[in-house]
Amino acid sequence: MDSSQSAAVGGNGGTSGNGTLISQSNDTAASAVGADDSMQKLSQVSDSIQKTLGLIHQLYLTVSTYNAAFQMPLLQRINGLVAELDNMVKLAEKCNIQIPMEVVNLIDDGKNPDEFTKDVLNNCIAKNQITKGKTDALKSFRKNLLEELEQNFPAEVETFRESRAASAAELKRPAQAQSALANGDVRVKTEH
């Protein structure tokens, strides 16, 4: 393989758009370093896969045109493939990527793994709609119950509302205290 082929097979010098793994951390600098490290490891595995595919292609070409004179290059290519597969296994052990078995089974069945993602999202949407329906029904029931109770027991409903307001105010105090930063500033939620 000449240098232009090895550059094409060997990858893209550490920059890969194949995906990133971001470790979750409170420190943004540590998470950026973790993301870069994970992305670099994933890129190395991807590069090794590309190199292995190139070696397999070379091996195919050697075998398809085999004669006794090609025995030494064939053995060298087989040894190169074995060494690269070993390297790929070592690199892959450093990556912590978990793939659901359903995705692996879909690939084994010759189907598109995007179907799994689509099915998971559709199931989530369906469950979300069911939960939203239940929540809306409970809100409607609460509203109707309070209206009926207010007509029949106005004093008790007023007492209930006052106690709810007091307990809501008590619950807000610890939440506000937790949102304070060490330097005394208050953490503000950004709206997206």
Image (cartoon, rainbow, N blue to C red):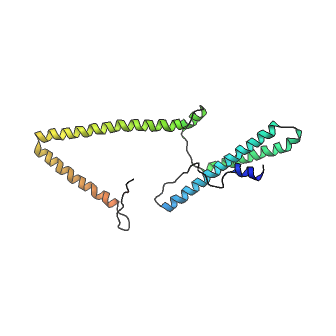
Q: Which residue is drawn at the image coordinates 17% and 47% (left, top)? A: 160
Number of dots carrying numbers: 0
Q: Which residue is the extreme one toward the right?
A: 69
- Give the percent coordinates (x, y) of residue 71: 86, 41
Question: Residue 47 placed where, x, y %?
Answer: 66, 50
Q: List x then y, in percent, for residue 46.
A: 64, 48
| 94 up-or-down from 137: above or below | below
Give the farthest residue toward the top.
109
Nearer to us in this view, 98 or 126: 126
Q: Is residue 3 left or right of residue 21?
A: right
Residue lying furthest front in this view?
A: 4
Give whichever of 58, 186 is nearer the camera: 58
**Where 127 sits versus 170, above or below?**
above
For the point 57% across and 57% down, which residue is it?
36
Instruction: Identify the residue at image location x=54%, y=36%.
Output: 102
The residue shown at (60%, 33%) is 108
- Image side of residue 68 versus residue 12, left or right: right
Q: Nearer the viewer, residue 1 or 139?
A: 1
